[in-house]
Amino acid sequence: MNFEAVIGLEIHVEMKTRSKMFSASPNSFSRKPNSEVTVFDMAFPGTMPRLNKEAVRMAIRVANALHMKIDHELHFDRKNYFYPDLPKGFQITQQRRPIGSDGYLEIRKNGAKKKIGIERIHMEEDTCKQTHFVDYTLLDYNRAGVPLVEIVSRPEMHDGYEAMKYVEAIRNIVVYSGTSDGKMEEGSLRCDVNISLRPFGQKEFGTKVEIKNLNSLKNIQEAIEFERERQSALLLKGEKIRQETRRYDESRGETVLMRVKTDAVDYKYFPEPNIVPVKLSDEFVEDAIATCPELYDSKFERYLALGLAEKDAEIILSSPDMAAYFEGTLPSGCEAKEAANFLITEINSYLNKKGIAIGELGFDPLELGKITLLGKKEKLTHRQCADILFKCLDDHCSIDVAKKELHIEAMVDDEGAILSFVTAALDANPQSIADYKAGKERAISYLVGQVMKLSKGKAKPSAVMAKLREELAKR
């Protein structure tokens, strides 16, 4: 490609406070339309906003996680425009003085870290939800006034992968800080992309195109890569890029024109007269930061220190509930790697089979930790431990009951006992010895089976295999 893409992102995050940004209406998802509104949400004359303290606390936590300068005085503005989803005819936002500014985060690409600058983070209220039909539109005011933080990056990304990793990192921060559930498919986290192309080496930006409302990490990467190719093809033909707003059509795998932009919209910002500036004490800001739950990156580094592989740590941290369950196993004294292995394989397999989430499992993580310890304490195989686990899950029984009903006993790895089983098996199967000497490797598998039969399944397979090879070499 002859051109460099310059990409900036605007991310809207719905905060999971109990009430809305400026009213006492419940802040929830998937309730009956227009059932959770107050007269303020619907812009009745004479109604007054009241700032949500918990939303401010959450915004401070996100700003701190993004290494931002935090403004200790809150100012709000009116963003004026007429649109069906905006009942008041204006949106309360922070234009002049955002709560956080001049930050960054780091992503990993090709084994190295890349720092991406963040211009600002500000608080505002969401609009109501529109549902369009052929000849009419329905409005649901439940979403009107939902608390938002908008995070605006600097134009420092250059491909779809970087943008995707940036959004993933933001999502990890807002989820693990308790700010949002980060569910892009439900609109809790929405992303707009601004992308332009310029010849390599040129400092001036090209004409910017906006891609609206991308709702998955996959779509973000694919939409940007398509747009890079589209704009590049136009420029190579000598055509100019129009300033447009586009959307991504997932079924076609391409961006589609929504509207052509001409001049910038004048929103006629002015200070919100019904919310006086709010001074935040140092104690309030420090407490918001100090009480923030442990974030993704901190957990990730801690899990690596516990001996987990990077991929395993990523799988566990893909869900806060799974991370919490994993940590619940550790007080049992189990090895972190072993607990992670059972969680990623056996537990995940069981959840998929039953079609349930880990929060619905109903099995104490301490008990899982105890089961993983049986391998060392009672010399059980991984398979035996897994059988005990599944028995406990299916029958809601204790570990001891599961062992008893499954007739599981400790494995024999005493060298003398195993030697006696191996000697008896070899003496009874001279043809298998001959086959092994002739290079038929599967003969040893047969002999392992004979030893296990003689030991009634109690001999440790790895010890049996080692002793068999040792004795076969002598014959």
Image (cartoon, rainbow, N blue to C red):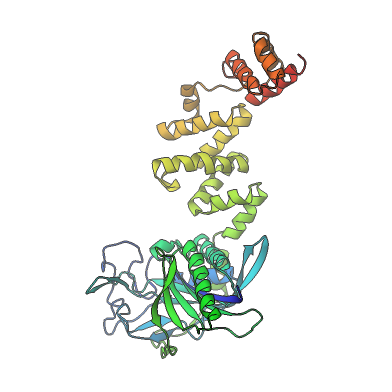
Number of numbered discs overlaid on the protein picture: 0
* Rendering quarter of residue 254: bottom left
Is 366 on the left or on the right of 185, as rendered? right
Decide if residue 14 is in sight here.
Answer: no
Q: Is residue 432 visible?
A: yes
Measured as percent of width and height from the top left, residue 177 is found at 52, 62
- Please name whichever residue, 234 or 412, is drawn nearer the observer in this view of the structure: 234
Image point (58%, 67%), residue name: 162
Q: In this rendered view, identify the residue nearer to me: 135 or 126.
A: 135
The C terminus lies in quadrant = top right
Left/right of residue 189 with respect to residue 157 in the rendered view: left
Q: Nearer the viewer, residue 26 or 448?
A: 448
> From this viewpoint, which residue is outermost toward the left?
135
Q: Position of residue 28 (x, y in %)?
A: 35, 63
The furthest residue to the right? 474
Toward the front, the furthest residue is 237
Residue 96 in picture, x, y percent from top left: 50, 86
Asked if residue 155 lies left or right of residue 179, the reply is right
What percent of the width, then of the height, locates residue 403?
50, 25
Quarter the N terminus occupies = bottom right
